[in-house]
Image (cartoon, rainbow, N blue to C red):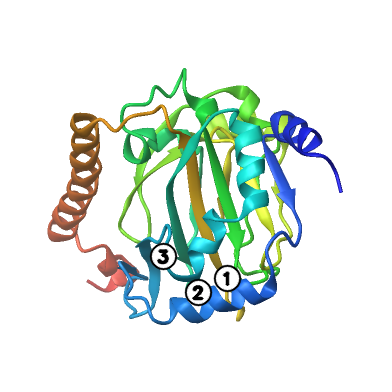
Amino acid sequence: MQTIKAYVKKFDENGYLLLKGFFSKKLCKEIKEYSKKLKPKVNIPFSKIGWGYGNLYNIGPIKKINEDIELNKLIKAILKNNYVFNHIMLANKHRWIGPDTELHQEIFNVNTFAPGANPKKDWKKFIQIFIPIDDHKEGSGRLRIFPSSHKMGQLKHEDCVNSLLGHKRRVTLEDIDKVYRKFNFKKLSLDGGDLLIFNTRLVHGSPSNLSNNERMSLVGQVRHSSIKFNKRVFEKECNYRSKVVQDYLLQKLKTLNMNNIYKDFKKNEN
């Protein structure tokens, strides 16, 4: 087993660190069973199947994650500072209908998860944690990353509304082409209990789950304890993100009212 110093060096160089079998299959099973008792905060559209369950930090068997001694040693070594968990969330990319996730950098949304932080100066003061609960098999929407893409700095982004009708920020086409030419992408092979830690500037995303395999994961973030919550920035950010979705939906309704696009299928017969 490598030393923590070697792990930190690998993290700094590649922008991520993958440790296989870090957590037990037993814990994954506990979390999976516990998820059945939770009431979803967000459902997959046009279904009653939960996609997100809110911030589960320090709740039920999930608290075993943030209490894990070896994980905490590793976090402290990477951040070189005292820290706190921003959140730990459960994401359910359900079989057949689990939605995709746009290519992005986590730092795009710093005003949501750490309002008050400076994305240009503080980007090293965060790390993302990704823990598959199920084995992520081919076709189930396996995570894609661009190794070392954090070295390109914060990229340009654009607003979008995803299939869950939530506001997101994705890397622009121009910048993602630049990243691809320099780094290509890597499709990760992840099993339940693996630990993935990555930089908030690492470009990543995942396709839809078009398989019959379940694909549940824990997604967390840790930050320097020195970063203090700024309520004004947070409220402004929440209002902005809500307005992007509202404007998109209003424009979509306007378009449908002006021109029923479905008539085009029989245009010659109208």
Three-letter amino acid code of the residue under disc 3: Ile
Q: For the residue carrying disc 2, how many other residues have a C-alpha within 10 Å: few (<14), some (14-19), or many (20+)?
A: many
Residue 1 location (% of width, % of height): 87, 49
- Please report contact status of discs 1 and 2: CB closer than 8 Å, yes or no: yes
Residue at 31 percent across and 72 percent down: it is 266
Q: Quadrant of residue 216?
A: bottom right
Residue 141 location (% of width, % of height): 60, 63
Reading the image, the residue beneath label 1 is 215
Closest to the observer: 178 or 222?
Answer: 222
Q: Secondary structure at mark 1?
A: loop
Quadrant of the image containing the C terminus: bottom left
Q: Is residue 31 above or below residue 143?
A: below
Q: Nearer the viewer, mark 3 or mark 2?
A: 3
Q: Which mark is residue 59?
A: 3
Q: Secondary structure at mark 3?
A: loop
Residue at 25 percent across and 30 percent down: it is 230
Three-letter amino acid code of the residue under disc 2: His
Gap between marks 1 and 3 measured at Cα:
21 Å
Q: Quadrant of residue 24?
A: bottom right
Left/right placement of residue 233 relative to residue 22 reads left
Reading the image, the residue beneath label 2 is 94
Work out whether mark 1 precedes mark 3 in sequence or the reverse, and give the earlier one. 3
Left/right placement of residue 217 relative to residue 53 reads right
Work out whether mark 1 precedes mark 2 in sequence or the reverse, and give the earlier one. 2
Residue at 60 percent across and 55 percent down: it is 68
Closest to the observer: 13 or 258?
Answer: 13
